Amino acid sequence: MHHELTVWSRGIIMDKEARDVSTCIATAARKLGYHAENVSDYVDDPDRTNCLVRRYARFADTPILDRFVYENPHPDWVVLVEETIIKAVNFFRGTEDGSGVLVVNSARDPGYLLKFLPDAMTKKLNKLVVVDAVGLAEQRGGSPWMFVRDLSELAFDRMSTEGAVERLAIGMGIAAPLIGALVAATGELPIDEVASVVADRDAMLRGAEQHKVIQYASA
Amino acid sequence: MSVRGTHIPEHLRLPIAGVTPPPTEKEGQRLFPTGNFRFFRPVYRDKTPPCNHACPTGEQIQKYLDFVKHDRYLDGYLTILEDNPMPSVTGRVCYHPCETACNRAAHDEPIGIRSVERFLGDFGLNLEENPIKKDLPPLNGKTVAIVGSGPGGLACAYHLRRKGYASVIFEALDSAGGMLRAGIPAWHLPEEVLDKEIAKLTGLGGIEIRCGVRVGSDPGGITLDHLRTGYDAVFLALGQDVGRRLDVEGGRSRGVLGALEFLRETGLGRPVKVGRNVLVIGGGNTASDAARSAVRLGGGEATIVSLESEDELLIVPEDLEQAREEGVRFRPQHSLVRVIADGEGNVTGAVLCQARLAKDENGNVRPQISEGTEFEVPCDTILIAIGQVQVLDWLPESFTERGLVKADEYGRVPDDSEAVFAGGDVMRGPSMVVDALGDGKRAARDIDRVLSAQPLEPDGPVEVMPYERLNTAYFRHAPRTPVPLTPAGTRSKSQKVEVTLAYSREEAVAEADRCMSCGVCNGCDNCYIVCPDISVMRDARENGRYSIRTHYCKGCLVCVQECPTGCLEKVPELDFDEPDAVVRMETAFAPYDGAHAEQAPFTRQLIEDAIAEYDRSKTVQPNGRGVTP
């Protein structure tokens, strides 16, 4: 058993959310006794709002040999913290055919989102999981942009301090329902164990229950 | 050191450790379609400004103000003519619902739209040739009968003519204009202006006005059946020109007149006698007009007696102020109890009492009179301005309801021919000139649809731009240009001197320049200037005057934030259902798919060997020590 999780997000405004997803999965996996790695701050440390960023985690029941590779070469779990990324980039590069689990934070109909994937990418899709993380998260602020942070917190990130310090507990805001949906849809990690490392446990459990799945390929 | 334009050899273009070498300048944007950064797209979406929405004719006010601002008066004039045939008239007499709705009122003061309209209207009246005449379609052989040559009838005839229909207007009075002539005093709307506007309409060809023909009531005259059989469609716009009577003791005495009848006689230039001490009963605009005309004619005093309190008076504010300046007095919250006449039946006074306005559950006015407060005032003329009606007994009963012509949402009268429409006061009760103009415009549109066998459709929903969505930081506070007025002392002595005067060219331009162009792109270039990505292009006009380069726009939304008019909106990128238009990057930064992010076999072997060695070292021996090779 070997899983590679790549979380795609937007620079600065949703960067912490992506980091939280990879960190929580890696932490939970390690607590469960798996070999796990979390690359939550590598390469994409942009000081640019909106630009694409990636966070990686992987875990396996055998030692992870890709020691000096930080970017997942064969991601089979992909989380899109912001829905528009579905049409922005080839997030299934290196994924094996019929094995990709794609979790999208969106309130839209899964069928609508699927339209944006080209054939080359749907070939790799195993299941599409759509969770309205914005709707399920603890509501703070009025804008999906600054959804979990107020201006001062955002300004803190703007000083390129990302990753150097964390101002919030890990697994808050829209990260929590995303983790819930991912764990529930993949079924590889027990939900309760993962929930124990997520700060906003309730929102994580809401995400685990309320998401839509399209089983695309029988893996 | 700048790397812009540096040539990078092919073999070095692979991303190294995720860091992509800088591309050549020429290739840069192709390699990095940074539009993928964006999850909101700026879109130019024009909304309806509140002035435009409030105007019953739907005048595109923002558009013509913008033309005036740029000294393009003919374009501005033509813009008005699309909706309103007589800007010189409405520019003088309109009660300007546009100004009431103007967002600028929340900023400082509303735009003087009516005065700019008058400026354009007078500009158009002075043109030698009617500029729309050369673009009119030829007559299509169909003729519409119109009853009434007031604003509703004239507007209907005009808009029908623009669609190729001829029309015949039947007017009961000896000259055309309806209430514009017979209800509005000349000091509001000079006769020459009205004559010129009507001449411009009849000059288009295909519009015939038959004066002195009262449809329906003259024995042996034209009846509704004549109209229905002799014409392709009928538009009833006969207005309400009969003053409502006040049933009080002495109400038939000599000197008690209907205000409407009084205004009509003076408007038509007939001799009218009015005393020096006039009472006007009523609290609306007719009362104000009648009182001010009485002051001019009689040279005496006029007092408006109304049930309404000062705040409730239904007189437009500027008229109220002008009336006060001219010496009109007010006696609010009073009612006429009876008229006192001498032995020959001439009015010598009136008994008034305190009262207040109350309405029953149907909305009808029911004065509440305070008993025992009666008192006498001397007067020699009493003008009654408590509403107006129309004689409709010549119409079939199914056409009328509560003294008005009954019509559906399209202004269509329930008739088998399905081609009888109505509009203006006779359909909606006492209302504004511009309401009638709007009804005429809509009736023309719908008559055209009926006669060309198209379905009637209601107007679609519109999005009206609220003040809150403007970026008001861009609009400096500027006071409204005051409208010049003739001094009260001069104007109150003459029936002919116009009270409100025109803006000069400079004033009209200055006033038009105050327009905030609510929700409509006016080409201010702000988006073009503020875009940090050179993604707003000015060379092509999509919806606004600009286009967004969607492959490169990163969605920073600075343009949306800084759009003064609010015509730029952010729209979620995924709302655009165009999967084929997607430019997908291969990875976030690396444009090439290559050896990126794979463990080299040699390195993998090193790691595997190291792990094996570690595992062996952890194998526990009976002596408690690890195995040594």
Image: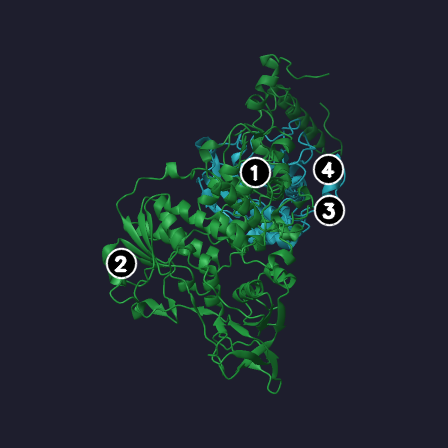
Label 3 to label 2: alpha-carbon separation? 81 Å
Q: Are marks 3 and 2 on the same chain?
A: no
Label 4 to label 1: alpha-carbon separation? 35 Å
Q: How many marks?
A: 4
The letter of the green chain is B
Q: Chain of mark 2?
A: B
Residue ID for mark 3: A168
Label 4 to label 3: alpha-carbon separation? 15 Å
Q: Are marks 4 and 1 in contact (CB under 8 Å)?
A: no
* Residue B522 numbered mark, or none: 1
* Closer to viewer: mark 4 or mark 3: 4
| Three-letter residue code for mark 4 | Arg
Label 2 to label 1: alpha-carbon separation? 47 Å
Left or right? Give the position of A111 relative to A164.
left
Q: Are marks 2 and 1 on the same chain?
A: yes
Q: Are marks 3 and 2 in contact (CB under 8 Å)?
A: no
Left or right? Give the position of A59 relative to B223.
right
Residue ID for mark 2: B227
Residue B495 x, y percent position in the rendering:
54, 58
The letter of the cyan chain is A
* Closer to viewer: mark 4 or mark 1: 1
Left or right? Give the position of B83 relative to B422.
right
Label 4: which secondary element: helix
Q: Sequence order check: which comes first, mark 4 or mark 3? A: 4
| Three-letter residue code for mark 2 | Leu
Residue ID for mark 4: A158
* Closer to viewer: mark 4 or mark 2: 2
Residue B13 x, y percent position in the rendering:
60, 17
Q: Sequence order check: which comes first, mark 2 or mark 1? A: 2
Residue B456 x, y percent position in the rendering:
34, 53
Q: In the rendered view, would you say B291 is above or below B410?
A: below
